[in-house]
Image (cartoon, rainbow, N blue to C red):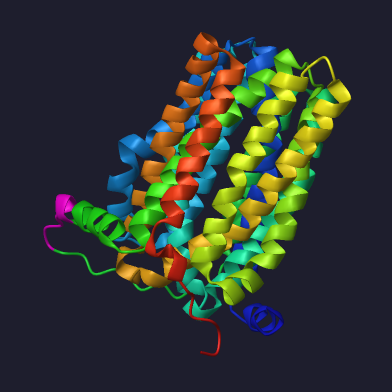
Amino acid sequence: MGEDATTLRRVAGFRSYWSAATVSSFGSAVSAVAVPVLVVTVLHATPFEVGLVNAAQFLPYTIFGLVVGAYVDRFRRKPLLIWSSVGRGLSLAVIPVSWAFGLLDLWVTAGALFVFGVLSVIGFAATQSLLPRIVPRPLLLAANARIDQSDAAAQTVGPALGGALVSLVTAPLAIALDAASYFVDAVLVARVRVDERVPMRRARPRLRRDVADGLRWTYGHAMLAPLAFSTHLWFLANAAGSTVFAALALRTLALPAVVYGAVLAVSGVAMLLGTTAAPRLGSRFGAGRTIIAARGAYPVAWAAIAVATIVLGQSMPTASTIVLFAAFAVQGVAAGCENANEMSLRQTVTPDELLGRMNSTMRSANRSLAAVGAIGGGALMTIAGGGMALIVVTVVFVAAAVVAARSPLRTAQLRQHGE
């Protein structure tokens, strides 16, 4: 990766883009701790209500995802990314402002997160489609790995920082920090040097045909289709698991916010290791095989989480905490190894004029299933208990791994720099 990293530093615009992504990742990592603590301990939500609030962030992908993808391919992506970042900062700021005036409740929180989700649909479609316009395609794996390294560093420091901030200044003020990060993100993106051509606009754009083209490309491609289905299952399981784990950890196990943040931070440390190894693994074993191996690690991690929270639980708190740290470390390594390879594979096989639609199609389905998972995880925990909910989560992770393993992904390779 050394030669690619040196070349990447010479790419105009990448440093500002990378800095923006890093700032945003640190803010989001703080909110990853602050939002569950706010909902569970400040607003005293039930597990089902926790699922509803989590789902509020994902529902916009179901409602607007496919349409947004079609429009992203019609406009310059940099301005879309700037204004979506400003909007996300404002929507998150509603939470601490409402809290300060004594107006914060579950519905205000869910509404703010829903608006945040709407703007995230635009922002993520734009950012994932803008990178290939900044970085030459042979350098995409190195670029995505660099961004993932920053994200992993944020997930290492952010949750611990979030836990400390929640303890010192309360959850709403910790969320205010994430809001501020999006304003900084917008300023940094504005500094990105990229020569974006203005997409040709038809006299009478056909939205339905544009959406259909994105769906056809994503689910008709020999490698993108199984990758998409496997990733959809992953999001379903991960959202359900996150909802159940937050309720179990903060309420049943009564973990302090600092400890809860530290458990998530371990995943960030492990993810940093995984992202560092991702380009080398993708080059040596192939992007597809690296993704498949990572998908196989998730059910192992979640089976361990089930043991830690249900079997060991409060009777053996020290052993339970140790197992949780180990399980989230496994999950972090897997995420770090696969994400850069998956994103680079998607960006490499997709033509530029379809990138917005492909990314929005994938993300729309991913987040739709995440909404189902968040609500379903909370409902299943309420009806059948945390143990059964975590068993179901583990089974869905197994299904995601099987779909990837029994597909042409086994032979997927990325074209490397210099080839």
Q: Is residue 207 left or right of residue 17?
A: left
The stretch drawn in magenta includes residue 38: no
Q: Nearer the viewer, residue 246 or 280?
A: 280
Task: Answer yes or no: is residue 156 visible.
Answer: yes
Find residue 367 and report its image quarter.
top left
Q: Nearer the viewer, residue 301 or 350?
A: 301
Task: Answer yes or no: is residue 162 visible.
Answer: no
- Residue pictured at 32% horizontal, 56% vertical: 357
- Residue pictured at 29% horizontal, 63% vertical: 221
219 versus 30 height, above or below: below
Give the x, y percent position of residue 104: 59, 14
Q: Residue furthest right?
A: 318
Give the x, y percent position of residue 29: 68, 41
Give the x, y percent position of residue 134: 50, 73
The stretch drawn in magenta includes residue 206: yes
- Residue pictured at 69% horizontal, 20% vertical: 310
101 versus 195 height, above or below: above
Q: Nearer the viewer, residue 147 or 107?
A: 147
What residue range appears in magenta? 203-209
Find residue 210 and report its image quarter.
bottom left
237 versus 122 height, above or below: above
Q: Nearer the viewer, residue 233 or 285?
A: 285
Find residue 46 and report its image quarter.
top right
